[in-house]
Image (cartoon, rainbow, N blue to C red):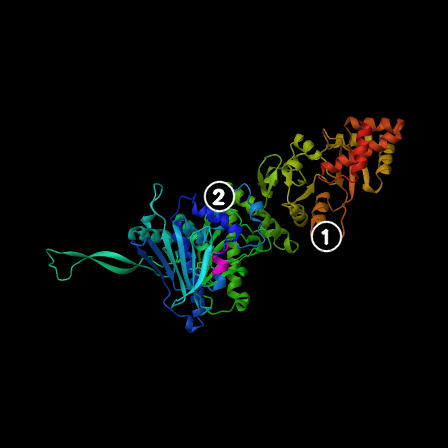
Amino acid sequence: MKQFKTQSKRILDLMINSIYTNKEIFLRELISNASDALDKLKFISLTDQNAKQDFAINISIDSVNKTLTIEDTGIGMTEEELEKNLGTIAQSGTLNFKQENQGKTDEELIGQFGVGFYSAFMVADKITVYTKSYNGKQGYKWESKGAEGYTIEECEKDNYGTKIVLKLKEDCEDFKYSDFLQEYKITSLIRRYSDYIRYPIKMEVTKTVKKEGSPEDKPEYEQVKEIETLNSMVPLWKKPKAQVTEEALKEFYKNEFHEYIDPLKGIYSKIEGAVTYDSILYFPQKPSFDYYSKDFKKGLKLYCNGVLIMDKCEDLLPDYFGFVKGIVDSSDLSLNISREILQQSRQVKAIANGIEKKILSELKKMMEEDRETYDKLWTEFGLSIKFGAYAGFGMNKDKLKDLLLFYSSQKEKLVSLAEYVKNAPQDQEFIYYASGESYEQISSLPQIEKAKEKGVEILFFKDGVDEFVAKLLTEYEGKKFKSVSEADFSLSGEDEKKELEKKTEENGELLAKIKEILGDNVKEVKLTDNLKTYPVCLISAGDLSIEMEKVLNAMPNAEQKVKAEKILQISSTHSVLEKLQKLYKEDQEKLSKTVNVLYQSARLLEGLPVDDTPSFVTFISELI
Ligand code: ADP
């Protein structure tokens, strides 16, 4: 007996003890696996006569032995594939299952990995899989009663494909598993969940027909068994538009992409023109667990006249819309086109163009008409779009800039740049932003307080990429971006400015002394009237901001540490200024310690580490 991989066991337990109420979806999962396997063999059969067989899914019910069997004539599995595919759930080796998934509910967990084959354990206490791969000569039998493990042995099998026999659980108070032995139940489940599967799903059904030879006026009836195809086999995108309802789109999504949670939105479109194609695109609710990792593969399913030719055609999606799932079916592509040629194909390029435009316009529409949903999408995928605006020196920034959202200090919610500009007073020259690691840290930046008091809206840049995007955009609708941590950021009026100049002159010697104490740590020491309760803050002097310094130094291959030029600002209205003056005149040694402590505090406010912790702590205790 072989053991399931540890992480699989946990999901398996979830399945077996089935918290999930919707047990019937196991059938959809097994049928969509069968359909995928048929797709694979069908594609091979385009060029290999040996792969040609009757492509179908057969279902049979054995009410005596209480088994339900689902058999396909698809590509099948080799011994290794059996081991790999049915011995492991959540195959990504890099995934640290426990750590990354703490605090998630069972449903969320299943949703993240997809239920797949294992969902059969919700209804069966024993599963036997017979399979023979197109890539191997021998048939194999896999069997498992659940968490204990599984066995694999050789077996006889004639044709390519996979046969899955489910020994259903005994009926209990909570659930009647024997329902799945009823023809009508299976028929209705197939119609509901799997109608658009492109291969016939056949089952022997009992029909009541008129007895042959019985008189017309006094007909007698008898029951006969007949093999019937239960599904319409018309792919959703080939159905009349009226039938492509929101419900149907959702169902199709779960079927086609082995998803468990509804999408945020499904979009169906038919394009006729230079290239003709149908597409169904989906915005998922959540990124897949590997979305923001190197392992992630984007792409749309590509069909040519209803035949799947590629499972993930990368070229159809730009990276920044990599989260979009969907299918494209075009009759303008050649069926036995190789993948290399596909990449060069003019048609694929044209389709990709059309798809990108469609996604852009749908996102803009959603932003205007259903902001709540757009905010959700942005929270999950905004980072991807922001990276898109930044990537390639901003070559796509103009396409994407209207989609960007940032948290607003004033509205306390996400706003677009257009909304910011519309809200700002006519004479406000800039779009103000503040950078930091989290909303909390940014809202406690010294500069924010004053801005709030003056009613100036500040955008919070909490992702490392935000400031780089702003630098690339440089402006939006004529307003330039300005950080509250830039040297010339000021919210003061003329009088206030004069007052500040005067004070700066009066304190000239003190400021020079403080600069001397801090040496190269800062480029300048200045007075500011941007602060309210805080005595000091650090701002950047050059183009490289303090936040950018943090981001760049955190990059995995940052060779040389970069350093933003910093200016220490001292509040012109805070009592600390007078105290410094006093120390300057009376106790230079204490001044030096105080200045150091103030400088380190300013670093902390910016989210930077203390430079020299021992001295810092010593100075503080001495000053106390
Ligand atoms: P998913 O289908 O989401 O990848 P599953 O757990 O349902 O996850 O299946 C795991 C893998 O097992 C599939 O990706 C496929 O390679 C293989 N598999 C499952 N069912 C079949 C089948 N009927 N024929 C061939 N391969 C199958």
Q: Is residue 304 above or below residue 449?
A: below
Number of residue marks: 2
85 within the magenta span: yes
Above or below residue 524? Residue 114 is: below
- Read off the magenta span: 82-88
Q: Is residue 435 above or below residue 274?
A: above
Quarter assignment of residue 430: top right
What's the CA distance linking mark 2 and mark 1?
39 Å
10 Å crowding of disc 2: few (<14), some (14-19), many (20+): some
Comes first in the chain, label 2 or label 1: 2
Q: Is residue 598 visible?
A: yes
Q: Amino acid at mark 2?
A: Asp
Quarter of the picture containing the C terminus is top right
**Residue on which the image places disc 1:** 558
In the image shown, does 579 or 620 lie closer to the viewer?
620
Q: Which residue is mark 2?
A: 106
Where is residue 166? Give x, y as percent: 37, 54
